[in-house]
Amino acid sequence: MSKRCDVCGKGPQFGHTVSHANNRTNRRFNPNLQGVRALVDGVVKRIKVCTRCLKAGKVVKAA
């Protein structure tokens, strides 16, 4: 399952977890994706959308 927004294409970003001893280990920042029933080209589909797109109103939810 890909962690990618179907509207804007936002995906995971990578960085480090930094401990108190300044040891660095790799980590991943996943986008906050929500499963939504939305109108896509006049058809109701289930898509994964990041909360930024939902808040911005880029998605028309199905009734």
Image (cartoon, grey):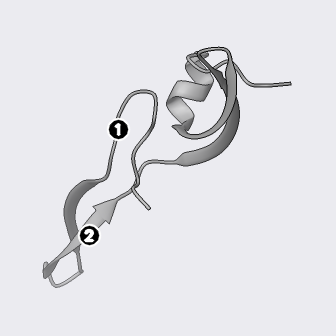
Question: Callout 1, which amino acid?
Answer: Lys
What residue sits 60% from the left and 27% below the top? 54
Q: Quadrant of residue 27?
A: bottom left
Q: Quadrant of the N terminus?
A: bottom left
In contact (CB < 8 Å): disc 2 and disc 1: no
> Looking at the rendered structure, which numbered label has been put on residue 27?
2
Give whichever of 59, 30 is nearer the camera. 59
**Extreme residue toward the right, this view:** 63
Q: Which label lies toward us, 2 or 1? A: 1
Give whichever of 54, 7 is nearer the camera. 7
Give whichever of 6, 29 is nearer the camera. 6
Question: Disc 2 on helix, strand or loop?
Answer: strand
What residue sits 51% from the left and 30% below the top? 52
N-terminal label among 2 and 1:
1
Q: Quadrant of residue 48?
A: top right
Q: Which residue is mark 1?
A: 10
Question: Disc 1 on helix, strand or loop?
Answer: loop
Determine whether 16 is above or below 58 in the image.
below
What residue sits 68% from the left and 22% below the top? 43
Measure the alpha-carbon separation of dots 2 and 1. Answer: 17 Å
What percent of the width, then of the height, locates residue 6?
Answer: 45, 35
Q: Quadrant of the C terminus?
A: top right
- Dot 1: within a 10 Å radius of its alpha carbon, few (fewer than 14), some, or many (20 or more) residues? some
What residue sits 56% from the left and 36% below the top? 51
What percent of the width, then of the height, locates residue 10?
Answer: 35, 38
Q: Is residue 17 left or right of residue 35?
A: left
Q: Is residue 58 left or right of residue 29?
A: right
Determine whether 57 is above or below 28 in the image.
above
- Dot 2: within a 10 Å radius of its alpha carbon, few (fewer than 14), some, or many (20 or more) residues? few
Question: Callout 2, which amino acid?
Answer: Arg
Q: Quadrant of residue 57?
A: top right
What percent of the width, then of the height, locates residue 8?
Answer: 39, 28
